[in-house]
Amino acid sequence: MIRPRRNRRTTAIRSMVRETTLCAADFILPLFLHEDAHDTPINSMPGVTRWSLESLVREAGEAHALGIPAVVLFPKIEETLKTQDAAECHNDDGLVPRAIRALKAAHPSLCVITDVALDPYNSDGHDGLVQRDERGELVILNDETVEILCQQALCHARAGADIVAPSDMMDGRVGAIREALDAEGFSDVSILSYTAKYASAFYGPFRGALDSAPKEGDKKTYQMDPGNTREAVRETLLDEAEGADMLMVKPAGIYLDVIAKVRETSTLPVAAYQVSGEYLMIKSASAAGWLDEKAAALESLTAIKRAGASMILTYFAKQAAQWLGQRW
Ligand code: PBG
């Protein structure tokens, strides 16, 4: 008789027939930072901290020592520096460029990824520039925003970023950023494009962490509709044609079909972002004693990799790397 259960009989056999195995090199650690000299635990995201520059460098070093190859930076910008034109986003002495320089100086082999979008810098809290039309409705300007995103990407490249990751969902920004980087001699700086970023309720805790929620309106005119996958294919083809080096799907665990579709559509590496709401669901259910945190977190990450992601942005990165190191 054919018995599939024979392949599940012992830990050793299961480990040999396993199709998807996680390792620390799969993870990218998102790190929050601010100008203050002290560290602040983020209320909306248990276990996650907003770091001072000094602590950021230490934390990134610890993650790297655990085998995590990359970090991605998310700054909380002081309210007084936020303007309608988000000019602080391309200030060479700004928080992010200083953090990039400090990280690369302390950990040269660490891959530093930056978020390219205006929401932390923009007094309106949107990823792009905001204008009001004649009916008084908010309009997010596309092409004007792309020009500023190019300046932001160049500023990060000048500071030494390895990869810039546009998370804004404006049309044409990947091609424009590629052209701007190449024109300034940064042909080695990669673009990790947020290809299919959905207008998701699961970003809520993150926006709390950075005070970056839109002051008015929502992000549905630029982020994707949760009902669509064919549109993700369209965005994939465009990003590939515009010169993206890597593609990203976000959120991750509730969009596994999209990850699989993007993976099948393109030969570029696929990343997925397990976002703050996904993290919080597992964290809070485990804190209440309703889920086994380690098992649930590793299972969720395995599922994201199984669906086709070869890089996972996750707030569990450090913990997961530690857990995997002590698996047996
Ligand atoms: C904004 C940005 C967001 C996240 C990453 N970059 C929030 C948003 O689009 O409103 C969310 C990450 C998370 O929820 O963990 N450019």
Image: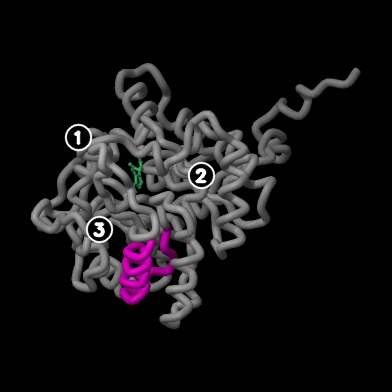
| Residue type at the position of mark 1 | Asn
Confirm whether the magenta stretch covers residue 159: yes
Give x and y (percent) for residue 250.
47, 41
Mark closer to the observer (1, 2): 2
127 or 135, nearer to the observer = 135
Q: Is mark 1 within 8 Å of ligand 1?
A: no
200 or 2, nearer to the observer = 200
Lateral position of residue 145 relative to residue 3, left or right: left
| Residue type at the position of mark 2 | Ala
Kindly state the secondary structure of the residue where label 1 is placed. Answer: loop
Q: Which residue is mark 2?
A: 196
Lateral position of residue 102 relative to residue 25, left or right: left
Query: In the image, what residue occupies the spot 28% across and 72% down?
Result: 101
Q: Quadrant of residue 216?
A: top left
Q: Is mark 2 within 8 Å of ligand 1?
A: no
Give x and y (percent) for residue 311.
52, 51
Ranked by sequence position, the earlier of labels 3 and 2 is 3
Question: Which region shows up in magenta?
Answer: 146-165
Query: In the image, what residue occupies the spot 68% across and 33% down?
Result: 14
Q: Which residue is mark 3?
A: 56
Give x and y (percent) for residue 166.
41, 56
| Residue type at the position of mark 3 | Leu
Ranked by sequence position, the earlier of labels 1 and 2 is 1
Label 3, residues with CA under 10 Å away: few <14, some 14-19, many ≥20 = many
Confirm whether the magenta stretch covers residue 144: no
Query: In the image, what residue occupies the spot 47% across and 54% down?
Result: 171
Task: Measure the C-alpha gap from mark 3 to mark 1.
Answer: 18 Å
Q: Which residue is mark 1?
A: 43
Mark closer to the observer (3, 2): 2
